[in-house]
Amino acid sequence: MTSTDVQSEAEDSGPSGYAAARLRLLTEGARTGPPRRAALSELTDEWLAGLFTAASQDVKGVSLVAVGGYGRGELSPRSDLDLLLLHDGGDHKAVAAVADRLWYPVWDLGLALDHSVRTPAEARKTAGEDLKVQLGLLDARHLAGDLGLTAGLRTTVLADWRNQAPKRLPELQELCAERAERQGELQYLLEPDLKEARGGLRDATALRAVAASWLADAPREGLDDARRRLLDVRDALHLATGRATDRLALQEQDQVAAELGLLDADTLLRQVYEAARVIAYASDVTWREVGRVLRSRAVKPRLRAMLSGGKPVPERSPLAEGVVEQDGEVVLARAARPERDPVLPLRAAAAAAQAGLPLSLHAVRRLAATVRPLPTPWPAEAREQLVTLLGSGRPTVDVWEALEAEGLITQLLPDWERVRCRPQRNAVHIWTVDRHLIETAVRASEFTRRVGRPDLLLVSALLHDIGKGWPGDHSVAGEIIAKDVAARIGFDRADVTVLATLVRHHLLLIETATRRDLEDPATVRSVAEAVGSQSTLELLHALTEADALATGPAAWSSWRGSLVADLVKRVAAVLAGDEPDEPAAAAATTAEQERLAIEAIATGSPVLALRAQTEPPTEEQPVGDPEPLGVELLIAVPDQEGVLPAVAGVLAVHRLTVRTAELRALELPDGVEGSVLLLNWRVAAQYGSLPQAARLRADLVRALDGSLDIAGRLAERDAAYPRRRGVVAPPARVTVAPAASRHATVIEVRAQDAPGLLFRIGTALDDEGVRVRSMHVSTLGANAVDAFYVTGAKGLPLPPDEAGTMARKLEETLRG
């Protein structure tokens, strides 16, 4: 069916005909993207014009105007119809009747309608008071009625907007900033709002408004295409959900990707992020230009310029060879020759970041268009300028994004293309892969005084996740890429080896510290063998902290930092030659732990203590305002079977969330016979306040003697309060860590955190007849990452086949 046929059907059949034609247009699949949006707008225009003509036959001085997105002719399947009934102030009763005959048919079809009835003077007054109304009127488009009335309003509104631009544009910029603060950045969100988030459709509309003011203009290249892509995604989202939504929820992304003919949801998100990055960068450049123009209008011309009758010559302050500052931006010097100076992009970027200034759009585009590729390997100056850029702290981000926007980063580092705008489907990560790498470099710049080779620290920060986007383990793939990149940018063979080691093992310290028994010499030896030297260990320690801090708030804490520091200290001792043949001395037992242990032996029952825990203040956090971490729960229990499921089950029954958990056998003072297990757990109440210690102890006694049916209690609660359906989490994975310990078998569990998870694991291990010698439990966002050191009945590690069988059974249990 052609567009003309659709319109004829709408005209001939009234509302029902329009509805049928609209449905056919949205479902036929022959037209998508801009052609479908234009066709839907045209179809709606014809229908509304017909309604208006029928409703206003005897009424003069009235017109129907489309505003906002509809005014731009960009109707998505579930878009609102933004309409203004404009009249000359004559017969108000007649105008009201026309409005009724227009609005009710729209409502009857279930279409969303944003409507108003105003005279030109009223519309102008409202626009002056409400910036959002003004923005909508900038896109006013005549539909039917008195064309002169509509044209007069358009002319007046545009004139007002241009006359008032010095006042209204800062107001618009503030609105954009407030919205960005609320909604976040579209290019990094896993469930972005395509319209409201920074870099979304609202920002694209704001850029049109700035251009209409004639005060400044946005960089045009790629902007229309980016806006079109976001509109295409919104169309597909409306069709997939059947709702007028702009939020691209996780559960809708596969269907939206299929609607657009894309490979998968990651491909969809990457396209969304790329479009958002174009719009966000254009916004930055445009608002910077607006500020420059407004400042230049506000200051008086210099006396010299007034006397000479010419324009003032802008001051240019040298920053580096070929690079100067002008009007608060970094630009190229007049004598600069990018075509002869391949280091100039890095030199200009480093100078801008060091000065905390933006790179001018003109400079970046000139560099991208004319600069020659760097030779391989890079000259020493290029490598030094890259390190300077990476070590400049927070200003590095904006400068890097300016280079990225014009393709200079992938020109310098071709491997960057794989990680550019790549989403990370992990609740712990708050950035895309590429932005996370830059954030890690920013964090690493704070630690350059802690290491002997800050250049290697900064470059390893930039490259540590470069393997993401390749098949298999990203650390293994990253090691290969890092070797190539490091050699290409001019590091010698020894430095290339160190950088490759840092990338290959960038997760080693945090994973070992939180999932392994540091008292086991095999643990420390394995780390020492992987690291190889004191200087590499020093770099890896700093990289580990920078990586975690750049990941998100759930990835680092003082507790995790202390575990990593303890591991580093032990590994450093081994690298220095102080390697004990026997297990290292047990962790220091505090007086409180010893008291609890002796009481547990004396009473033959569990003893516990609760105490609040907080994070100590950091440099960015004032003293006296610590971060709450929950409550530390210390439990001493005479060694016996079933301790882990009993404790975990009691905590689950009392709705206590386990954030971290450790279990170990405690050495008792001389003269005290017996064996005690010490559990040091950090917990928080899901609802309300914590239960009393006496009540927890009483339930723990009952759980250990079998009189408390924990499984039954948890099942009853789940039946009474079923969990809401949400995003389907990946299935649990259980593995045996090879050669992790000579004294026990290490079982690793990675699963979605849920109430009672630790109870289920402990019960399953007990059912297999193994003893938990020690354990290390941590929660990262919604993910539980747990390691259990288990032995058989004789206290020895399990045979490999038995360990594998048990891991498979545990995995089946957790997936069931």
Image (cartoon, rainbow, N blue to C red):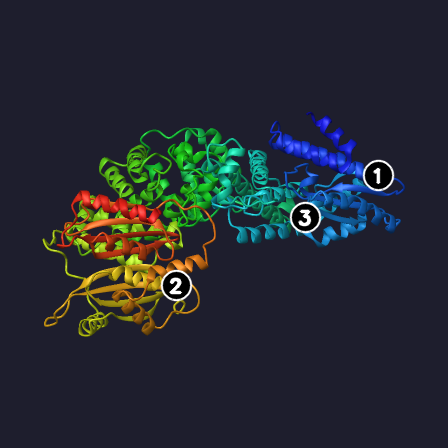
Query: Considering only order in the chain, which callout, 2 or 3, is on the residue closer to the N terminus?
Result: 3
Spot occupied by residue 497 in the image (x, y as percentages of width and height): 23, 38
- Residue highlighted by disc 3: 165
Task: Say whether marks 3 and 2 touch (CB < 8 Å).
Answer: no
Spot occupied by residue 277 in the image (x, y as percentages of width and height): 51, 40
Q: Is residue 480 visible?
A: yes
Q: Is residue 532 visible?
A: no
- Residue highlighted by disc 1: 54
Residue neighbourhood size for the residue with mark 3, other residues' Cα within 10 Å, grouped as few (<14), some (14–19), many (≥20): many
Q: Nearer the viewer, mark 3 or mark 1?
A: 1
- Amino acid type at mark 2: Arg
- Amino acid type at mark 1: Ala
Q: Considering depth in this image, is 464 or 269 the residue closer to the camera?
A: 269
Q: In the rendered structure, find residue 655 and report the number of the disc placed on it.
A: 2
Q: Helix or strand or loop: what does disc 1 sit on?
A: helix
Q: Considering depth in this image, is 217 or 6 the residue closer to the camera?
A: 6
Spot occupied by residue 720 in the image (x, y as percentages of width and height): 45, 59
Q: Helix or strand or loop: what does disc 3 sit on?
A: helix
**Residue drawn 25% across and 39% down?**
495
Q: Helix or strand or loop: what does disc 2 sit on?
A: loop
Q: Nearer the viewer, mark 1 or mark 2?
A: 2
Task: Say whether marks 1 and 2 touch (CB < 8 Å).
Answer: no
- Amino acid type at mark 3: Ala
For the N terminus, which image quadrant? top right
Q: Is residue 210 left or right of residue 325?
A: right
Q: Is residue 731 left or right of residue 724?
A: left
Residue neighbourhood size for the residue with mark 1, other residues' Cα within 10 Å, grouped as few (<14), some (14–19), many (≥20): few
The span from disc 3 to disc 1 (Cα, nearest Å) is 40 Å
Spot occupied by residue 461 in the image (x, y as percentages of width and height): 34, 44
Query: Considering only order in the chain, which callout, 1 or 3, is on the residue closer to the N terminus?
Result: 1
The span from disc 1 to disc 2 (Cα, nearest Å) is 65 Å
